[in-house]
Image (cartoon, grey):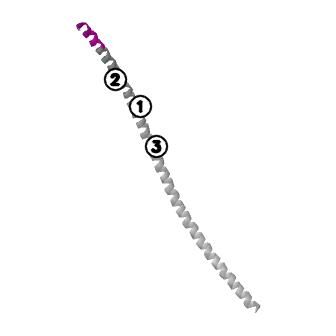
Amino acid sequence: AVVSTQSGHYGRVEKELLDLEEKLKDAEHKKGSLREELSEQNTLLKNNVEKLKLEIETRQSENSMLQSRISTVEENCSFLEGQVQALERDKKEKSTDCDSALIPLL
C-alpha cells in the first residue's frame, strides 16, 4: 500500500513538473514575442523621432526665411513712411507757396 501511494505521489509530482515545464515554455515564447514586438515598436519610435527632427529643422529653416522676409518688409515700410512724410511736407510747402503767391493778387 505504501508503494502504490508513493507511486501515485510521484505521478502527481511528475505531472506537476510537466505542467510547470509547459508553462515555462509558454512564458519563454511570450517573452520572445514581446521582445520582438518591443524591438519593432522601438524601431518605429526611432524612425518617428528622426522624422520629427527633420521636420523641426525644416520648420526652423522656414521660420528663419520668414523672419528675414519680415525684416525686409519692415525696412520697406519704414522707407515708405519716410517717403510719405516727405511728400506731405512738400505738399504743405507748395500749398503755402501758392497761398503766398495768391495773396498779392487779391
Q: Mark 3 points at which residue?
A: 57
Q: What is the secondary structure assignment of the residue under circle 3? A: helix
The image quadrant of residue 74 is top left
The image quarter containing residue 60 is top left
Disc 2, SS = helix
Question: Which residue range is magenta in the image?
Answer: 96-105
Q: Of callouts 2 and 1, which one flags the residue occurring earlier in the amino acid sequence?
A: 1
Q: Is residue 6 left or right of residue 104?
A: right
Q: Does residue 104 show up magenta in the picture?
A: yes
User: Mark 2 — residue?
Assistant: 84
Question: In the image, residue 41 lies at what x, y percent?
Answer: 51, 59
Callouts 2 and 1 close, C-beta under 8 Å: no
- Three-letter code for the amino acid on which mark 3 is drawn: Glu
Alpha carbon of mark 1 to alpha carbon of mark 3: how far? Answer: 21 Å
Q: Which of 83 and 105 is in front in this view?
A: 105
In the depicted view, which residue is nearer to us: 90 or 9? 90
**Closer to viewer: mark 2 or mark 3:** 2
| Residue 6 coordinates in the image, percent (x, y) | 74, 87
Q: Which residue is drawn at 73% across and 89% down?
A: 5
Q: Which residue is drawn at 57% across and 69% down?
A: 30
Task: Report crowding for label 2: few under 14, some 14 to 19, many 20 or more residues within 10 A (C-alpha).
Answer: few
Dot 1 or dot 3: first in sequence order is 3
Residue 82 location in percent, x, y? 37, 22
Residue at 58% x, 73% y: name it. Answer: 26
Q: Is the magenta stretch mostly helix, strand or loop?
A: helix
Which disc is residue 87 wearing? Answer: none
Q: Name the residue under label 1.
A: 71
> Residue shown at 54%/61% (left/top)?
38
Kind of residue sitting beneath label 2:
Val
Of the residues tagged 2 and 1, which is closer to the observer?
A: 2
- Residue that extends furthest to the right in the rendered view of this protein: 2
